Amino acid sequence: MPAHTMRAVRLHAHGGPEVLSYDEVPMPVPGPGEVLVRVHAVGINPPDWYLRDGLSNIPPDVRPKFDLPVIPGTDVSGVVEAVAADVQGFSAGDEVFGLLRFPSFDGQAYAEYVAAPASDLARKPAGIDHVHAAGAPMSLLTAWQFLIELGHDHPSPFQEARHRPVTLGAGTTVLVNGAAGGVGHFALQLAKWKGARVIAVASGAHESFLRELGADEFIDYTKSRPEEVVNDVDLVLDAVGGRESSRFLRTLRRGGALFPVFFGAYDDAETARLGVTVSGTQVRSHGAQLTEVGRLLDAGTVRVAIDSTFALVDARSAHERAARGHIQGKIVLTVPR
């Protein structure tokens, strides 16, 4: 392979996992404010298969624009290869991880090298490897920006009001729906870190995993409906969301809040009658917040669960694994050196 090319996974058309193509492409050149990262691992996230599908699940008026062919992916962990002249704080040889250019779909992470905005990166925690670091950025920042600190003033495309996290602590009860997945398992750990009591909702196969992460109570949704067995919850973090999310309103105390990661339809009259609120945000790249959560990862206070790993060339198999669902933690692509 010529010295100025690399391998990357690209989309030339939209469709299922079979449209992911392993190509030889030009090596990126870092522009102003960017660093060139030699990628060691790439985290897979739902926006990756949304892009693969053509973003058909996003309303046309808020759908990001992009041209084919495109390299998908946003979450990387790797080593700085070079820095632009105006970049300070990073040098060649630094180990870094980051969520790149989100909420645009221009992360271009499924590749051997990526030109990354320095502001989207943080030093990789020394206590974890590249696979675990690559599994963290989008999912952990989502949980952080929903629960702990928004960190930006950009409105969500699905609501007018600015999202505001609620105070968590001893005496607070948090229910996490979809607790075994990427966002869910981080949300559980962050709520426990703040001292909250956590009810985890997932299928029964994940009970021991979620108990190990600190869940105080577990509900197997295949056997019980949470809204029929739980009440007086302070906060629901619904990492599944969608059309059935409104059922969790009935688990809340008056004054409680529902935070759906994937927004659904909610009846204003019902939320007013119940005295509860529904609020969400759009996760955004944030290197400074990654530095902060990196300390929790380094200390072992928060850990990254890895469902499975696949080589970059096997991105199709990784997407097929994602499509089967019931993911425990994160799916990660590895880039052999």
Image (cartoon, rainbow, N blue to C red):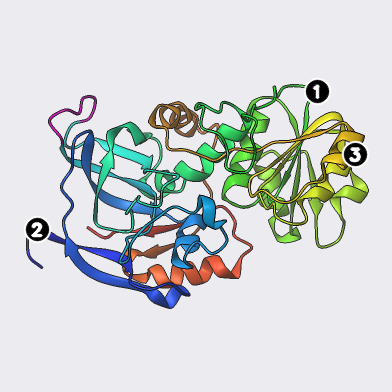
C-alpha span from label 2 to label 1:
57 Å
Q: Amino acid at mark 3?
A: Asn
Residue 231 image label: 3
Quarter of the picture holding the C terminus:
bottom left
Q: State yes or no: discs 2 and 1 in contact (Cβ < 8 Å).
A: no
Q: Which mark is residue 217?
A: none
Q: Which residues are magenta?
A: 84-90
Q: Which of pointers 2 and 1 indicates the residue nearer the eye?
A: 2
Residue 154 in sight: yes
Q: Position of residue 327 (x, y in %)?
A: 59, 60
Residue pictured at 10% horizontal, 68% vertical: 1
Residue at the outermost front position: 61
Q: Tell me if mark 3 has few (under 14), some (14-19) or many (20+) residues whose alpha carbon lies within 10 angstroms of its own.
A: some
Q: Is residue 153 magenta?
A: no
* Image vertical order of residue 288 relative to residue 333, above or below: above
Distance in Å between CA atoms under marks 3 and 1: 14 Å
Element at label 2: loop
Q: CA distance from mark 3 to mark 2?
A: 59 Å
Q: In the picture provided, is 122 more to the left or to the right than 264?
A: left
Q: Is residue 107 above or below residue 110?
A: above
Q: Is residue 18 above or below residue 219?
A: below
Mark carried by residue 171: 1
Instruction: Give 331 or 247, whichever is nearer the viewer.
Output: 247
Number of residues whose C-alpha sits closer than 10 Å to that of mark 2, classed few (under 14), some (14–19) or many (20 or more): few
SS for callout 3? loop
Secondary structure of residue under mark 1 = loop
